Image (cartoon, grey):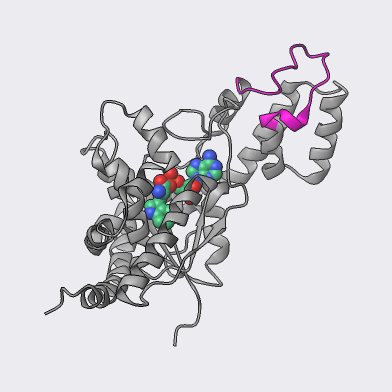
Amino acid sequence: MDRKKRVFSGIQPTGIIHIGNYLGAIKRWIDLIPKYNCIFSIVDYHAITVMYDPKEFPNKILEAAKVLVASGIDPDKAILFVQSTVPEHTELQWILNSITPIGDLERMTQYKDKKQQNADNINAGLLTYPILMASDILLYKGEVVPVGEDQKQHLELTREIVRRFNKRFGDTFPEPQTLLGVAPRIKGLDGNAKMSKSLNNYIALVEEKDEIWNKLRVAVTDPARKRRTDPGNPDICNIFSFHKYFSSEEEIKKIDNGCRTAEIGCIDCKKILAENINRTITPIRERKRELDSRDNEIRDILYNGTEKAKSIAEKTMDEVRGKIGVKF
Ligand code: TYM
């Protein structure tokens, strides 16, 4: 009998997995694998709500799978699959659409942001996006959902959907718990917005050494520190906040003090960070490079994941169809 709790989480195949995704979610996914039954999905149907190139899309999905495997998602110990290969996701979404008030969706912060960012393509998918997320989780009766902070509101909505469904059709789904990552909200190199692919303010998880430096060199630090001789304030410096995740305690102390006393400048501070980020991600980048020539193996991993995911999804849908009265 399966007593381990079930974890579900997903990531969009946008072509780049960045260190925000890693620290906000993926690192936590990897930690959970030994203790839980983990299911991770590359959520391609979520990604089609914005403009994209259908010819490039299959490569982006494969690329995402490679980065996930390279970063430590062991497909023998966790299920890894592509969302669209289990059609029950969209089937359940239709059912949940019918119990979710539009007002709840219109209140979602991410919807409001995306409406602004995609003013020429405000499609219904942008609005119903969180219902597809709820379906992803509930199809597997997910109990723990490791995500970054930007997904918290969507998970609150998922819990409301669960309560509404269970009340109307009988106890079916557990209320999933949100588990935030080690760094739930990593800012981008502009020091302002959340790190994201679309804002081009990211360091990729497989970024090359020179590129890490090129990006850090021009990244925003304490805006009040204009000259090398000015003392800085690490508390408001975005670069300093990265050190917390990549540098040793001793280095952090030294940098904190050196910055406040103007003993070290922003460039020195960034050089240490570049070194440390590079050291942390080098093994991931190297494993990813090995996987680049193994597309068929990656496809097999994903097909295998689909089979396992499907067997759970089919059972849930059978139960759901019975509960809502569409099973003959
Ligand atoms: P996505 O693809 O935008 O991001 C994947 C994960 O990375 C986290 N994240 C961040 N964490 C910290 N700082 C950042 N700057 C940062 N940027 C992204 C996200 O919070 C997320 O955990 N809708 C989801 C994918 C999804 C999903 C699900 C998640 C679909 N179905 C079901 C959980 C459960 C998304 O677009 O994530």
Instruction: Pinpoint residue 319: horizontal percent, then vertical percent.
Output: 26, 77
Report the quarter where the N terminus lies.
Answer: bottom left
Q: Is residue 228 left or right of residue 80?
A: right
Q: Is residue 231 magenta?
A: yes
Q: Which residue is located at x 42 percent, y 40 percent?
A: 110
Predominant SS along the magenta part: loop
* Image quadrant in which the C terminus is located: bottom left
Q: Is residue 55 left or right of residue 202?
A: left
Q: Position of residue 265 (x, y in %)?
A: 78, 21
Residue 16 visible in the picture: no
Q: Residue furthest bottom?
A: 1
Task: Give the camera-side residue of 142 and 32.
Answer: 142
In percent of the image, x 42 and y 60: which residue is there? 160
As displayed, is residue 170 above or below residue 145? below
- Residue 278 in the image: state x and y as whole percent: 61, 38
Q: In the figure, 103 relative to 99: above or below?
A: above
User: Residue at 49% of width from left, 82% of height from top?
Assistant: 3
Q: Is residue 114 left or right of residue 192?
A: left
Q: Is residue 186 above or below residue 116?
A: below
Residue 122 in sight = yes
Residue 109 as seen in the image, left or right of residue 314: right
Could you say which quadrant of the image residue 31 lies in?
Answer: bottom right
The stretch of residues the image draws in magenta is 218-239
Relative image position of residue 247 (x, y in whole percent)? 73, 42
The foreground one among 64 and 279 is 64
Name which quarter of the figure residue 134 lies in: bottom left
Most foreground residue, 171 or 57: 171
